[in-house]
Amino acid sequence: MRLIKISANKPSFKTVYFNNSGLSLIVGVRTAHDVPEADDRSYNGVGKSLLAEIVHFCLGSNSNLAFQNQLLEWEFTLDFEIGQTYFIATRTTSKQKEISLNGKVYKIKAYNEFLEKLIFATPDIGTEALSFRSLIPRFIRRGNFDYNDPKVTSSDREPYTVLLRNFFLLGLEIGLIEKKYNLRRRQTEIEEFEKNFKRDPFIREYYTGNKDATLQAKHLEEQVHRLESDLSNFQVAEDFYDIEREANRLNKELRELKNKQVIIENALNNIEKSLSSRQDLSKNKILGLYNELIGAFKEETLKRLSDVEDFHERLIQNRVARLGQERMKLSAELRSTSDAIKYANTQVDSKLAYLSNKRALDQYVSVSSQRSELLGKLHKLQDYQRLLQKSRDDLVHIRRDFAEETIKTNLYLQDSETSRNKHISLFADLSKTFYPDAPAGITIDNNQGENKVRFDFDVRIEADGSDGINNVKIFCYDLSVLILGNNHNVNFIWHDSRLFSDIDPRQRATLFKVAQEFCSRYGKQYIATVNQDQLDALRGEFSDTEFAALFSGENVVLRLKDDGPESKLLGIQVDMHYQ
C-alpha cells in the first residue's frame, strides 16, 4: 500500500501529493517571528496532525464527531495503490458510516475487511485481535499516546494484543501467544464461574455454614421421593371445599339436633317426676289437721271445704291430663329429632368418608410446588457438584497445558534463535547509527507466569537516559517493521512532528538521513509532519548542499503557514478537537 494523494471537495483545501519513495515532508512554517515558539499561534493549528487524522478517516477509522460538527458538507479523498491496483477512497463528513472505493459504496466494516485481505496476511487464529484497523496505526501513529512506546498504539487494549500484533508484524511465532492467552482466559472463566456460583444464596450456605453438599443432596433426594410418592397417591376432588363446607354445615345441624334432643329428654324427665310425685289430699285429712279447730268451723264452712276438695280434685285431674298431653307431644318430637340425628350422622359420615382419601386441588398444587422447589435445589446442587468437579478437572488439565506450553516455548526460543534474529536484528543495526556504543535490540523471553502473556517482549536502547531515546526507538522500530515487510503490504510510515521535538539535533539529522537512505533503497515512503525550526536546527549537521537536498525541493510536499487561515491545511479557520 502506497499513498499517492489526499484531497477534498473544497477548493481551499491544500491537496497533498506524496513522493513515490523516500521523504515526503509536510512542513509547518512560523511566519510571526515576534511570537514565542511556545505560543499556540506558531506551529500548532496549521493542520499537520489533522492531515494524519484525515488519512485515517479515509482508511475506515471510527466516525469522527468533530468532522461532522465542524466540517459540514466536506468530503475527503485518499488516492493510494496496492500492488499495481489504483484506489480512490472518498468519505463524507455528514455520512460517515459509508465510504466509496473506486465508485463502489462500502459500509465501514466491509471496507476495512476488504483492505485487510489486500494488505495484511492475517491467519485464522487471533482474527479479532489482528485486523486492518488494529494494525494500520503502527504505520501511521495517532495522538500523543502512540508516541510513548514503540510497541504500543491507541488500538491496543491489553498486553496480549500488544504482543500478538508486534510478533505478527515481525514475522515471529504467534501460535504460542494465542495458545497461552486462550488457556489463561479459560482458566479465568472457570475460576470466575466458581466464584459466581458461590454467590448463589443456596450454594453459599455450604461455604458460610457447616453443611456437607453430598449429605444435603442425599437428603434432598429422599424428600423429593417422599413427595413424589404422596403425589402419586393423591386423589384430587375438584368439589373438595364444597363437600367440606356441606359436612361442616351438617355437623353444625347435628350439634343443634343433639342439643334439642337433650332439651326434650330433660322436659320428659321433669314431666315424669311431676306425675310420680302427685299426692291426693282428702277432706278427712284436712279435717284431721284442723280437728282442734273444729269448734271454730261452722257447718257452712265445712261445706265449702268440701267444695274446695272437689275443686282440688278437678285441678289435679286437669294437670295430669295436661302433662300427659305434653308428654305425648314431646315423645313424638323426641322420636322425630332422633330420626333427624340418625340421618344427619349418616350424611356427615358419607361426606367425611368421601373426603378421607381425597385432597383439594390447591393442596395438590402446594405439594407439587414444594416438590418442584426441592427438586430445583437438588438439581442446582447436583449441577454445581458436577460442574465443580469438571471445572477442577479442567483446571488440572489447564495447568498441565501451561507446563507443556512453557516447555514448547523454551524449545522455540532455543531452536529459532538464528532465524528469529534475522527478523529483529535490523532494529539493533538502525539503533547503532544513532548510538554506536549503546547495546540495543529486541528482547524476547519466556513468561512462565499464569497470565495471558506468552513472552516478555521489549524494544531497548541502553544508552544514557535522555528524552529523545524513546523517540529514536520508535523511529528505528517502525522503520524495521516497514522494511522487513513481514505479513504486510504497507510501503509507508507516517510520523508526527512530536516525534522530533525531544531528539537531539545530531540524532535528528541522522534520523532524516537514515529515513531517506533506507526508504529510497527499499522503495518505501517516509512521510513526516515537521516544524521548520526543527529543520533549521539541523543546518549545522549538514553542508548547505546536503541540507537543501534533504529539506527542500521535492522532499517537501507541502508547507503550512500560520499567517492566516488561507495558508493552513483546510484554508479556513476551524478549531478542531478531533482526538
Image: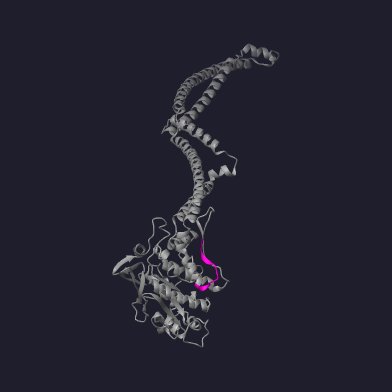
Residue 559 placement (x, y as % from top left): 41, 82
**Foreground pick, 558 / 258:** 558
Of all residues, the one furthest to the left in this rendering is: 103
Is 526 colored magenta in this rendering? Answer: no
Q: Is residue 439 above or below residue 411?
A: below
Q: Is residue 268 visible?
A: yes
**Foreground pick, 264 / 556:** 556
Of all residues, the one furthest to the bottom in this rendering is: 34
Q: Quadrant of the N terminus?
A: bottom left
Of all residues, the one furthest to the front in this rendering is: 418
- Tell whether 468 sits left or right of 234: right
Which residues lie in the magenta part? 433-443
Q: Is residue 137 visible?
A: no
Q: Residue at x 55, y 45 (%)?
A: 204
Q: Residue at x 37, y 61 (%)?
A: 121
Is 434 colored magenta in this rendering? Answer: yes
Please name the colour scheme applied to the rendered image: one colour
**Foreground pick, 284 / 474:** 474
Residue 404 placement (x, y as % from top left): 49, 49
Q: Residue at x 70, y 15 (%)?
A: 293
User: Number of marks in the image?
Assistant: 0
Residue 324 placement (x, y as % from top left): 51, 17
Residue 371 placement (x, y as % from top left): 47, 36
Q: Residue at x 53, y 52 (%)?
A: 450
Q: Is residue 371 above or below residue 431?
A: above
